[in-house]
Amino acid sequence: MKDCAKLSPPSSDLLAYRSMGFQLRPRVPARILLVNPPVPEKARWVREGRCQQRDIWGAPYPPLSLARVSAQLARAGFETRIIDAGPEGKDLGAVLNEGRSFAPGIVFLTAATPTLRSDLGWFAPALKKRLPAAKIAAMGVHVTALPEQVLSRYGALDFAVLGEPEAVALDLASALSSGGSVDPVRGIACRDERGLPRVHAPARPIEDIDSLGFPDWGKVDRAKYLMPIVGRPFTVIEFSRGCPYACGFCMAHAYGGRRIRRRSVDSMLEEIRFNLSLGVEDFLFWSELMTEDGAFLDRFLDTIIGEGLPARIRWVCNSRVDGLTAELAGRMRRAGCWQIAFGFEFGDERILRLARKGGSATLERGRRAAEAAHDAGIAASGHFVMGYPGESIETLRATAEYARSLPLTFAHFYAAAPFPGSPLFLEALEKGWLDPADVESISQDKASLRLDGLEPAAVDREIRRAYRSFYLDPRVLRRICRLPASPREFAGLAALGLRALPFLKLL
Ligand code: SF4
């Protein structure tokens, strides 16, 4: 076998260890490096499941996937190190030097569509040259959706990890470290003896997210991740995984699957308390569907309120628009929530349906959700998509107008991006809206769909227009200025505004 190879030296202890369900620690721990790679232009990129975006608010997310994988590996006895190149300010040379001194046998890196050429065509080959014996595995939505293509194109890559990575990474690392074959490892792609890509059977979903334990945040410099405006370290707490909806522009299911798996309230509370013991009081509760299960959310909020935690913690979350009521928003506020990011997506009902937003999401429901949050004292943030197939200049302007008409404090306007893994990707290739040569430069920062009567340049122009009309609206500016609770937060807000200006297309 050419690249589905073994690490040396083989160890029968490790084989035994693997066959016992990883209950024992390997006698000679293998070193494993986990990297969120640098990019040539030194920007900070978030590569977390469906989030494949540049850090625009000066707040890169802590690298949850890397910390989760590291926790599984460390628990099994591997020695791990995490490098999050952007937030740590490490360029290619610094990462390579650190990699060489750590001397890992395996490197797991996160890769995303907009940075794929640099992740796998620039960073991975440089790493391979510096660490020729190390096996390099990439994870993320893009490699999950197109494993054969990435293995054919990028020779430095040895493995693709498909879907949620924790159990797969542990299986792969255990097989490689033990000298066993990777053949039984599910959820990977590698090369066969002829050097051709080979995709293994999919991994089984992780049923019990609590069983993963807490992320290995001890390997991450938390001071690098500050909540915008608040200016204090924050962390991400996974609330649930999976999304049953099938919005055309979204690839969440390619990473976390379609079935919702929730944490237990006890486990999340324990994780909050653990973070408090480390001095972290600000949180992003990560869920595709925070408000979907009202009874579960009620239990969570009751427990937080009952334990008096709102006096100590502040948190933000995402939500669809169809789950939030005025009553629920009030309870979330009492439990410490200060911002909800909603996926409104479009300002036109027809496009909302065309994009298969599903559930009971409508413009009216969106308005009620934004008002409920605003009236409860929670800053409502809106995410909007522009340039979806079927749109016209009129619908793009309707989206911008809809955004301005809602009581929002922030708005983000993204180009409809046919990311691999999304339903829109295949449709765009089939209908000729996407040039296959452009697949690795798809980004939500720049329109790439070539639609009849709606050129990408026109979409980009309308996005700039939408940003300007939103952020120059005096009502929005008043809402933003009401956010800071102290002179320090006001300074944080001013710094955020200055950093955001170029991204908001106001410069
Ligand atoms: S609701 Fe739609 S946009 Fe949100 S995560 Fe699910 S599929 Fe994606």
Image (spheres, rainbow, N blue to C red):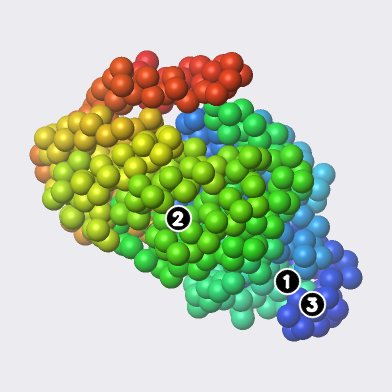
* Residue 440: x %, y % from top left: 40, 47
SS under mark 3 = loop
The nearer-to-camera label among 3 and 2 is 2
Q: Residue at the spot x=18%, y=55% of the render?
A: 353
Report, in whole angstroms, how far the alpha carbon at label 3 lies from the one at label 2: 34 Å
* Residue 496: x %, y % from top left: 51, 22
Contact between labelled residues 3 and 1, with CB atoms less than 8 Å apart: no
Q: Which residue is nearer to you in this view: 123 or 379?
A: 379
Q: Residue at the spot x=35%, y=55% of the render?
A: 323
Side of 133 where 309 appears, left or right: left
Q: Amino acid at mark 3?
A: Gln
Q: Amino acid at mark 1?
A: Ser
The nearer-to-camera label among 1 and 3 is 3
Q: Is residue 278 above or below residue 2?
A: above
When asked about the image quadrant of residue 21, the answer is bottom right
Q: Amino acid at mark 2?
A: Met
Outermost residue, right direction? 27
SS under mark 1 = helix
Report, in whole angstroms, how far the alpha carbon at label 1 lies from the one at label 3: 12 Å
* Residue 46: x %, y % from top left: 53, 42
Q: Which residue is mark 3?
A: 23
Q: Does any portion of residue 175 appear in the rendered image?
A: yes
Q: Which residue is mark 2?
A: 290
Q: Which residue is nearer to you in this view: 459 or 286?
A: 286
Q: Is residue 188 above or below residue 334?
A: below
Ligand 1 lies in quarter: bottom left
